[in-house]
Amino acid sequence: MTKKKKSGGKKLTAQQLQIEVLKFLLSHPKKQFSPRQITDQLRVTNNKDSAEHALRQLVQAGSVAEHSKNKFGVALEKLTKEVDELPEIEKKASPRPAKTAPARKPQSQRKIIEGRVDMTRSGAAYIVSELMDTDVYVPPKYVNGALNGDIVKVLLFSTPPRRKGGKMLRKPEGEVLSVVKRANEFFIGTLRKGRKYAMFLPDNLNMPVDIYVPLEACGDARDGDKVVVRVTDWQEGKGRVPVGKVTQTLGEIGGNDFEMKKILINQGFELTHSEEAETEAARIPETISPQEIALRRDFRDVLTFTIDPVDAKDFDDALSYRELEGGQLEIGVHIADVTHFLKPDSSMDKEAFKRSTSVYLVDRVNPMLPEKLSNNLCSLVPHQDRLTFSAVFTFDQKGKVVKRWFGKSVIHSAKRFSYEEAQTILEGKPAESLLQLNIFPDLDKSLKALDRLAKQMRKAREKNGAIGFETDEVRFLLDADGIAIEAYVKERKDAHLLIEDFMLLANKEVAEYIDAKGKTQQEVPFIYRVHDLPDMEKVAEFARFAAELGHPLKVDTPKQLARSFNHLMHAARKNERLKLLEPLAIRTMAKAVYSTDNIGHYGLGFSHYAHFTSPIRRYSDVLAHRLLERNLDGRVYRVDKNKLEEQCKHISVQEKKAADAERESVKYKQAELMRRHIGETFEGIISGIIDRGFFVEAGNSKAEGLVDFKYLDDTYTVEEGNLRATGRRYKKQFKMGDRVKVRIVSVDLQRRQIEMELADLGS
């Protein structure tokens, strides 16, 4: 395909011109320009009347204020976050409600709030605070050294936002007064050594200042090395720079290992555990004393097994199966008893809380706990006694739970199943498991009984309003150096769902038990996993989008929405085009978080829900175990609810960081894989359309590349809703869900960006 050469600029559509004018004014906030000067600077052929119309549209939208220093000077603090974060290859976008210019309050009426910093690429920030219904915008000049994720105090400049007809009319603005708590103290970057001191240049764009490093704090790092630096003194104040210490010199720059470490460091996760934590772990005995076993309910003579991924290294849950009189079944959900080893306020415990979660990148795990606990003492490996915290349920012949028990226990797992191995038994063809089935003939019967109960519980949840989102999870085959050589979509079968269903049951029942205990007298504070109702404005916008793709939805009430989303998920299994709607549907939903305020879990259709089943990798579950244990056997224990709520907030923030890190590692591997196929042609599906071009999703890797309109044979206009683009001259259309043949042109690993071109332009 031949790329068109520029010849003195081009004519932009009205929407494109508005965006380019806004970006231009953003980069020249203090200068004055006439409409003609703007078109000249942009090198476009649109006339001055078009530019003046674009400016007036921006004024009406509230993005540009006529009352600023020049006639159409941009009011930086009034720009929305979407405009502020326009990247080189824009994210898939949809039209946003117009924002009006906020008004300032008199100094005496301003108030101070506390919140978390969400930085943008321009250096501006948005402060997320529970005290406000919307984010607080902070212009770059008022950020005052705050960094992404920091907890800060902010002085508000303007009145709180108002709503009219369901739409937000303005965003409040403010200035950072002080940093209450830093989100990250470790950074990755380049060390520059001088004769008297060294300077550290961070790679992270969200760290806008260099760090001073005394020579004696450089260790064995040399000039130009990539290193990890820990800030030891923030030196807050105008004109002052932070002071740091080199904690690690990294390996080969640009390699897979370096990039994965960089992702972890940039999200604030330490690469290793401290010496103090490792020393504590090393001191823990590896044998279980008879005295400890005597204190626990003994399940060692009950058939017990684990089902996990084939490459799993830690096993934190097991299931047991026992037939009772009268056709009843006793099913035990046995969870690694992490709290037996992890004592409150120990070095291990403090580090576990600080991390709050294990981080699962494509090629590695950054564990919450030292390896001796996560991969050894707490891991429910087969053929060894292990300490557990159990939730045991008695099911009647109709599959209804009629009895439940929670408590400390000891188990002995008879078999470690991979998901694939368990699936062969459920499908009646247990080739690799035949020997084990001869030794434990009840394994076959127990797995099938568990599967039957799981399907019954799943059906009941959906009837009760649970939403069955099943997004594609991409996995990679890696070579010896960790380089991606193949990608595939993880298939979820009955064996996967079986485990999930029993974990959901245990989590729900634990939450219900604690809540009921608090209702008899006074509330028993607990850490719940909550999921709020969706934003119905976003849902309505999504419904319009789905209708244009030929799939109308009924979304007038939350229950209607749940039914419609489930219907969409089922339809998407047969219609590849509808599959594109699944991630968009998820974006309309609220985010699940941890909280002491139990508002229920909308997505699961549960009125009570907690996380109890993964204490090896989630600190929320550690807290749940501690609180549950102290409220068993007729005892009542109430922790300070305010302190617990602060812990909930921290864990929720860490969970988001871990998810971002995991997503970043997938994007890196997708780009790495696509780099092996530069110049090759394949068929893909249009997964998003923006003003610059359209994204094409590539097969099993789910990698997305951008086909830029400027390299096509026409000027394209994107219709409202971003569902299709139409050529002005030849009227050719590109629509969401269309299959197209594309060629990979280039891959930028650092930016995780893939550029494509149409391979069948002439067809």
Image (cartoon, rainbow, N blue to C red):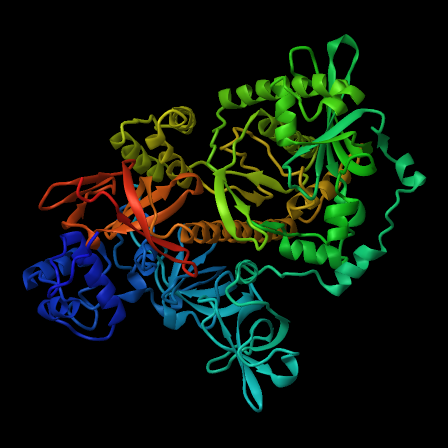
* Residue at the image position 63 percent from the left and 17 percent from the top: 428
Q: Residue at x 60, y 53 (%)?
A: 646
Is residue 584 shown above or below 369?
Answer: above
Q: Nearer the viewer, residue 77 or 263?
A: 263
Image spot of residue 423 (x, y percent)? 61, 25
Q: Is 476 in front, or is 134?
A: 476
Residue 508 visible to an observer of this rendering: no
Q: Quadrant of residue 616?
A: top right
Outermost bottom residue: 195
Indicate the position of residue 185 as horizontal and vertical percent values. 58, 67
Q: Total label count? A: 0
- Relative to residue 708, is residue 487 drawn left or right? right
User: Can you give x and y, in whole percent of width and height, for residue 183 in the image?
Assistant: 55, 62
x and y percent of residue 396 in the render?
Answer: 70, 13
Q: Is residue 204 left or right of residue 437?
A: left
Q: Is residue 711 left or right of residue 319?
A: left
At x 76%, y 8%, the residue is 326
Farthest residue in the right direction? 290
Residue at the extreme top: 326
Q: In the displayed structure, would residue 646 be above or below residue 551?
A: below
**Image quadrant where one finds the C terminus:** top left
Residue 352 can be seen in this image: yes
